[in-house]
Amino acid sequence: MVPGAEQLTPHYWHRAKRALARRDPVMRGIMRRHPRIALTSRGDPFQTLARSIVGQQISVKAADSVWTKLLRVAPGMRPEEVVAGRRRLLAAGLSRRKREYLLDLARRFANGSLQAARWTALDDEAVIEDLVQVRGIGRWTAEMFLIFNLLRPNVLPLDDLGLQRAVRIHYFDGVAPKVEAIRALAGDWEPWRSVATWYLWRSLDPLPVEY
């Protein structure tokens, strides 16, 4: 994240909360238990994606530790800095595979094959299609980018384990639902499925994640 960058909260947040509270009493209860927090984005696309790569398959604490070390290699966390510091990435705690992923991402930003400015004009699926061309970025990571960076309001990350767990606890009496059942449930959340997902995450972990 860029030091000193202004945090942005979605303009639709309060409208979405009111709509979800009217439709879904379970969601209303979750939101009441977490009244003074909201999704925010610092608005830097490269850093959002880089943090997603760093955080894959490790704990939040471990990811924060690696990120802190990466900032010593690339203090501004700009693509050109990452490419220039490529020989020091392993020493920062990245695995060889994640080093490859991060370098692929940085090079694509640096050479212009990924152009963040065009994503605001694309729909969600078009952005996902663009992002999954990068090594190490699959649909889940692209969906996290849509939610946490572009602040898209209607993303439903069906493969997310946290979402699956929260839905199981709050809506299905602890029984794991099928994907089709989650999708059907989320029909009541349209067009605010990102907001509903974010609050379900909060029901498991009250500290918001920042990408």
Image (tube, rainbow, N blue to C red):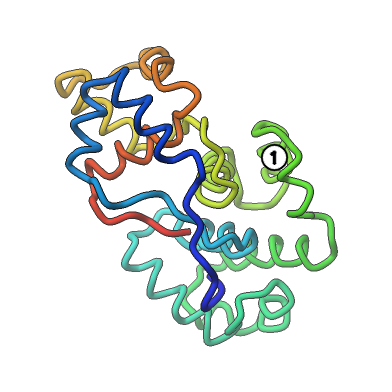
Q: Residue furthest bottom?
A: 72
Q: Position of residue 22 (x, y in %)?
A: 30, 20
SS for dot 1: helix
Q: Amino acid at mark 1?
A: Val
Residue at 56 percent of width and 39 percent of height: 152
Q: Which residue corresponds to the image point at 53% horizontal and 87% vertical from the top-left? A: 72
Against 40, residue 163 (above or below) is above
In this rendering, position of residue 26 left or right of residue 89 = left
Q: Residue at x 84, y 65 (%)?
A: 111
Q: Residue 98, percent across and down?
A: 56, 63
Q: Nearer the viewer, residue 66 or 152?
A: 152
As drawn, 172 above or below 70 = above
Picture coordinates of residue 26 (x, y %)? 21, 24
Q: How many marks?
A: 1
Q: Position of residue 116 (x, y in %)?
A: 73, 54
Query: Measured along the vertical axis of the image, is residue 112 above or below residue 66?
Result: above
Choose top left, top right, bottom left or bottom right for residue 197.
top left
Seen in the picture, residue 12 relative to 47 is either above or below; the reply is above
Along the line of sight, the residue nearer the viewer: 178 or 17 = 17
Q: Is residue 30 left or right of residue 148?
A: left
Taking the spot 52% from the left edge, 81% from the top edge, the residue there is: 71
| Residue under numbered circle 1 | 127
Position of 129 with respect to 199 (left or right) is: right
Front one among 36 and 110 = 36
Pick the residue in front: 188 or 134.
188
> What crowding class fits label 1: few (fewer than 14 Cα within 10 Å), some (14-19), or many (20 or more)?
many
